[in-house]
Image: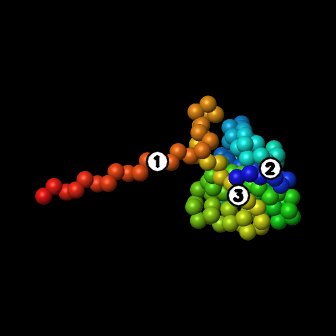
Amino acid sequence: MDFSTQPRVAAVYLRCFPHDVWQMTAHRELLDEYAAWLGLPTPSLFLDNGVSSRCHAAQRHHLLASVRAGFVQVVLIPGRWVFSLDAAKAQQAAGELTDAGCTLLELPPQWNRPARTRQLFPVVPAPLAAPAAAAL
C-alpha cells in the first residue's frame, strides 16, 4: 500500500486492561514504524489505558468522532483485540470505524518480531505435495 501520494492523517488506537504503566510502548513504537514504512505521517495516539472492553472507551469514541469529522483517514491497530476479546464485538467496533470513512490497518504478523528478523513481505508457502496414492 502506498499512502505517500495523498496527504493522510493517521492515528493509532490502543486499549489495555488492566492499566499498563508503560502505556503499551512496544505496540506504539511498532505501529509508528509501520506507519513510516507505509509512507504515513507520525500517527496521533488514542489510548484507553486501564479500560475494560466492557466499559465506555472514551478515546475510542473520540477517535470515531475524529474519523467522522474527517480529521483521521487511517487507523492503525496491532489487532482487533484492542477493541474487544470477543470477536463479534471487535468486528463491530472495527466496522464502526470503517463505516465512518477510515482505512483500518492491522499490524501484519511479521511486524511483531524485532526489525532485524522481520520480513517486510510475507513468505509464500510452497505448494503442498500431492498425497501419495494409497497402496492396494
Graded by Cα atoms within 10 Å as few (under 14), some (14 to 19) or many (20 or more), the crowding at tag 1 reads: few
Q: Nearer the viewer, mark 3 or mark 2?
A: 2
| SS class, disc 3 | strand
For marks 3 and 2 on the same chain, the one whose residue lies earlier in the sequence: 2
Note whether residue 47 is visible.
Answer: no
Q: Nearer the viewer, mark 3 or mark 1?
A: 1
Kind of residue indicated by mark 3 = Leu
Spatial CA span between label 3 and label 1 = 26 Å
Spatial CA span between label 1 and label 2 = 30 Å
Spatial CA span between label 3 and label 2 = 16 Å
Kind of residue indicated by mark 2 = Ser
Q: Which residue is mark 2?
A: 4
Q: Which residue is mark 3?
A: 104
Q: Nearer the viewer, residue 2 or 25?
A: 2
Q: Is residue 63 above or below residue 42?
A: below
For marks 1 and 2 on the same chain, the one whose residue lies earlier in the sequence: 2
| SS class, disc 1 | loop
Note whether residue 105 is visible.
Answer: yes
**Residue 136: image location, x then y, percent:** 13, 58
Look at 70% across and 58% down and name the residue there. 104
Kind of residue indicated by mark 1 = Pro
**Residue 93: image location, x then y, percent:** 68, 63
Looking at the image, the residue that sits furthest to the left is 136
Q: Quadrant of residue 99?
A: bottom right
**Residue 126: image location, x then y, percent:** 43, 47
Look at 82% across and 65% down and name the residue there. 68
Q: Nearer the viewer, residue 83 or 67?
A: 67
Q: Which residue is mark 1?
A: 125
Q: Nearer the viewer, residue 77 or 135?
A: 135
Look at 77% across and 52% down and name the residue there. 3
> Is the C-beta separation of discs 3 and 1 under 8 Å?
no
Residue 133 marker: none
